[in-house]
Amino acid sequence: MRPSTEDNQTYGPSLPWAKFFTLAFWRVFYSRPCGARDVLRLTFPFMVSFGTITIVTLTDRLCLSWYDPYEMNAAFQSSCLFWTLAVFPTGIGTFVNTFVSQYNGAGQNKRIGPVVWQGVFIGIAFGALVMAITPLIGPFFRAVGATDSTAALEQKYWAYMSLGAIAAIALEPLCSFFEGLCEPKTVMIFALAGMLVNVVLDPILIFGVCGRLRLGLVGAGIASAVSFWTMFLLLLYAAFKRDATGELGFRSGCRFNMPEMKRLTYYGSMSAAQQSVEHVFFGVFTLLMGWLGDDESAATAIGYNLNSLLYMPAAGMGLAATTLVGNYLGAGKPRLARRATFTSIALAASFAAVFSVAFLAAPGFFVGLYGLGDPDAFEKIRPIAVMILRIVAVYLYVDACNLIFTGALRGAGDARFIMRATFIIVGLALAALFIGVRVAGFGVYWCWWALTGYLTANTLVFFIRFARGKWATKTLVDATPHLVDSSFKSDDNKGR
């Protein structure tokens, strides 16, 4: 189906300002295709799914802190390295969403299964590699300064947690299968099931039952691995069941497919590289905070924790934008893809406004919650954390917009531009951080403003890219005419 002339127009706000204050306008904003209802319907399950992995690792650390703080620290360091190495392959797995979304919107359903399986095969290969490097983990941690006893604990935790590495990485393309089909509730339900398995197994395997099975750090690693395999196997079963008729090519596509593997590796690697570079940037930022001092590092941790209140909704809306843009762009409807993006921006800005006003109005209240345990010792941290929270109030807006514009361009398949722009901006931001801290002697506030500047630059560059509309030509589906899925075809004449 060829996009209509109307679908290719650049739509901006066309209503007089007075209509923004009418009930009719907000009713249309909520109910029209790619309106608030469609975005929120996807956002909430995405938020829950993101949160389950966080809870799995948090439960491990919390239970281990009660068992032995030294084992908790070893598990923390080992799991941080694990997820750092997993950023690249999981980035490829999440890009499967773009292919599934566009194939689904374009009605090329038979191509969905094969590309999902290529993502699973990549996850299996990387997961096996993570398991294979277990003997190197202890020497690595000793090389970066860990004591022999701590390095041994870190390697032990890795050995057991990595038993779930294949599942942890390979489940991402299976999640993308359902996300791209706009069925995120399936992912949410099974992610919650995996989280529940971990929450139940952690205290049993760490502390034991009646003096038996008191495994400590080993038990935490086993519990995480079992939870990952639970999620993976449930998602695999659900995917086979979803394709009961074979129309999605999942049942028949379980084999190596060179054309789809090349395309996924090409585009997915660029997306994964961008995510990896961002991960490195935030890692360097955290290390610099530690170099500046314990008080600055503790205040930064508070800023990160409070910022996470908005990160999950914004990240969920970013993934919703990826899914909707991919589906409607595949269906030849860039107008609706554009609408989905700006609806997500409007919702994210509204969420950010609530937290920003709260942080600016009462920063002492939020910061003070972290000092209830030892108020006297906290007094040195309080003024630093209050100032950082004021910066976070600005940071929230640009972070939310950055996530959504990045998600929208990723949904269009514009992975090369995202990667190149991020590499350049990250390079400039890292230079600003090091020059400011190591040469000019600036402190913690400089780092936070540099971080805000990095996200602002990212947002402006991606907004300009999106506004120019070149992303609409980046579709990953065939250029030849094809049947469009009826659900997206029917949306063409709604909400005009």
Image (cartoon, rainbow, N blue to C red):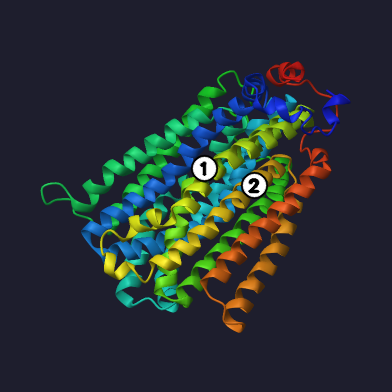
Measured as percent of width and height from the top left, residue 20 is found at 68, 28
Please say if the residues under marks 1 and 2 sit with CB atoms less than 8 Å apart: no
Q: Along the line of sight, which residue is nearer the eye, 327 or 32? A: 32
Location of the N terminus by quadrant is top right
Q: Which residue is mark 1?
A: 354
Q: Along the line of sight, which residue is nearer the eye, 377 or 308? A: 377
Badge 1 or badge 2: first in the primary sequence: 1
Q: Nearer the viewer, mark 1 or mark 2?
A: 1
Q: Crowding near pointer 1: few (<14 within 10 Å), some, many (20+)?
A: few
SS under mark 1: helix
Using the rendered view, name the quadrant where residue 324 is placed.
Answer: top right
**Residue farthest along the right direction in this orientation:** 5
Q: Crowding near pointer 2: few (<14 within 10 Å), some, many (20+)?
A: many
Instruction: Name the side, left or right, on which 207 lies relative to 478.
Output: left
**Residue farthest along the left direction in this orientation:** 210
Measured as percent of width and height from the top left, residue 171 is found at 50, 41
The relative height of residue 28 versus residue 228 in the rendered view (above or below) is above
Residue depicted at x 63% and y 53%: 272
SS under mark 2: helix
Residue depicted at x 24% and y 49%: 205
Q: Which residue is mark 2?
A: 401
The relative height of residue 132 versus residue 318 in the rendered view (above or below) is below
Residue 484: mark: none
What amino acid is at disc 2?
Answer: Cys
In this rendering, does residue 249 appear at all?
Answer: no
